[in-house]
Image (cartoon, rainbow, N blue to C red):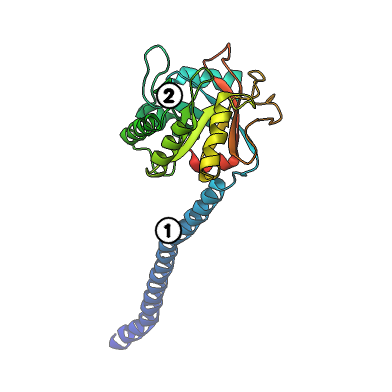
Amino acid sequence: MLIFISALVLLLIPIFYLQSDSKETSHNENEVTTTSTNEQPDQTTEENANNDVGNENANTTIDPNTDYWGVDSASYTTEELYACVNENFGKPTVWGRYLGTIDGVSSGLTTEEVEYLHANGVKILLINNQFNNATGYENGVEQANIGISLAGELNVPEGVAIFADIEPNYPVDSAFIQGWYDTMMASPYEPGIYGVFSPDSALVKAYQAAINENQDIQNKVILWTAYPHIDVTTQANAPVNEAGAPEGSLLYGWQYGIDAATCNIDTNLFKGSLFDFLW
């Protein structure tokens, strides 16, 4: 009997070790699986890194010499207005808006608008129209400071341009342009001027006089012209860029169509170079 039990034990021992080896092997396989799972975040991180590079590349695809279609408006940018523009004209890459409200003239840009436009991938062009007289150095300084203050209230980042809105019926001289330029250059923001830069306009004469006195104005002040006037169009039917302004100026914008019958907008072409100065 004892001999039989000993023989049985001897037969069971190999089976026990085989099962132990099997569990150990199974455990090791689980360890391999766990290790493989732990490696996944590294792959995800690599994919995210690749996506970041893709996004960075996407942000640098603006061609400085290419024309991009956009609009400007004196109205608050509601979802309805944005949809109106998209449905009737096209998707703008740039949206011009005013700093500060003037009753009966223009609604001032708000932080809610900024968030909404940025969420839709639209760059914002800033306009200062808080004046109707563009003469005198001190006046130029004052109007620049108003624009700087209004931009600061919205937390506009440095390097963004603010355009002085000099309408064709405004009196204008070179002293105002010099005052505007000097003050803007001493601020976190960049100087821009909007107006009708037709060859015989008072604005062109004042601009020419200003650059004769200070060549840096020609090299630093960004121009956005409303000359020549064509007509409002859709994005698809935008004209070939024929913007007119003094030779050698930084002419980055052309408001070719004014007062659309549908939606309260004007239509524009903007050079890719302007995007460095948009918000």
Which residue is depicted at the point 58% across and 11% down? 261
Residue 270: x and y in percent read 59, 34
- Of badges 1 and 2, nearer the viewer stands 2
Disc 1 crowd, CA 10 A, few/some/many (<14, 14-19, 20+): few
In three-dimensional space, the C-alpha distance between marks 1 and 2, rounded to whole angstroms, equals: 52 Å
Q: Quadrant of the C terminus?
A: top left
Which residue is depicted at the point 45% across and 59% down? 40
Residue 144: x and y in percent read 38, 33
What is the residue that sits farthest to the right in this orientation?
A: 240
Disc 2 crowd, CA 10 A, few/some/many (<14, 14-19, 20+): many
Residue wearing tag 1? 41
In the rendered image, which quarter is residue 130 located in?
Answer: top left
- Using the image, determine if residue 132 lies above or below residue 151: above
> Horizontal placement of 238 versus 3: left or right?
right
> The disc labelled 1 sits on which kind of residue?
Pro
* Labelled pair 1, 2 in contact (Cβ < 8 Å): no
Q: Quadrant of the N terminus?
A: bottom left
Depth order, front residue of 113/136: 136
Depth order, front residue of 163/210: 210
Disc 1 or 2, which lies upstream in sequence?
Answer: 1
> The disc labelled 2 sits on which kind of residue?
Asn
Element type where label 1 sits in the image: helix
In the rendered image, which quarter is residue 225 located in?
Answer: top right
Depth order, front residue of 208/155: 208
Residue wearing tag 2? 129
